[in-house]
Image: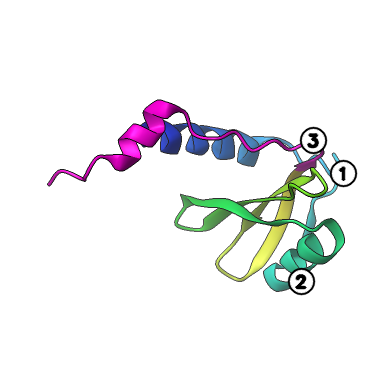
Amino acid sequence: MFKRIFTSAMILGAAAMAPPALAQSQLSCADRDEMTETLSRKYSESLTGAGLQSSKRLVELWSSAETGTFSIIITRPNGMSCLVASGEYWQLTPPSAADAADDAEPASG
């Protein structure tokens, strides 16, 4: 499980630091509700994963198995979300057998 969390954190962290993919010179931002409604309605995307980049930034991955599109947005505490990356041909990779075994183990404590 640690490996899966670490890998997800690395991917989302790298994406969050990447330049905007939508328009290299202009960041597309809107209220989170408006942004997620557009992702859902126009691209059939749904929330696939999320994590905190810092106490002031929530990074979310939205994707669609139906259309193959994906979007990465960052949301600030004021509710403003900005699209930092988007693309096509999204593929969800199933967890490996080692990750599944990690998930099956009870937490120690």
Identify the residue shown where x is 44% and y is 35%. Answer: 4
Residue 19 x/y as whole percent: 74, 37
Where residue 80 appears, as percent x and y from the top left, is 67, 66
Number of numbered markers: 3
Q: Nearer the viewer, residue 41 or 73?
A: 41
Within 10 Å of disc 1 (Cα), the crowding (few <14, some 14-19, many 20+) is: few
Q: Magenta segment: does it hold 91? A: yes
Give the mark toward the camera: 3 or 1.
3
Estimate the spatial distance between the alpha carbons at disc 1 and disc 2, rounded to whole Å: 19 Å
- Magenta span of residues: 86-109
In the rendered image, the vertical position of residue 8 relative to residue 47, given as above or below = above
Task: Count residues near mark 2 (Cα–Cα under 10 Å), then give few for <14, some for 14-19, many for 20+.
Answer: few
Alpha carbons under labels 2 and 3: distance apart? 24 Å
Q: Say whether residue 25 is visible.
A: yes
Question: Looking at the image, do the residues carrying marks 1 and 2 touch, with CB atoms under 8 Å apart?
Answer: no
Question: Is 99 on the left or on the right of 91, as rendered?
Answer: left
Q: Identify the residue position indicated by label 1 in the image.
A: 23
Instruction: Find disc 2 in the rendering and name its residue.
Output: 34
Q: Which residue appears at 39% of the width and 35% of the height?
A: 100
Amino acid under disc 1: Ala
Which residue lies at the image location 49% right of the left edge and 34% below the top edge? 95
Badge 3: residue crowd in 10 Å (few <14, some 14–19, many ≥20): few
Q: Secondary structure at mark 3?
A: loop
Q: Which tag, 1 or 2, sits closer to the chain's start?
A: 1
User: In the drawing, does residue 68 fall left or right of residue 60?
Assistant: right
Q: Nearer the viewer, residue 48 or 80?
A: 48
Identify which amino acid the numbered label 3 is placed on.
Tyr
Q: Which residue is mark 3?
A: 89
- In the rendered structure, does residue 42 fall within the stretch colored magenta? no
Q: Nearer the viewer, residue 8 or 55?
A: 8
What amino acid type is highlighted by mark number 2?
Glu
Residue at 87% x, 44% y: name it: 23
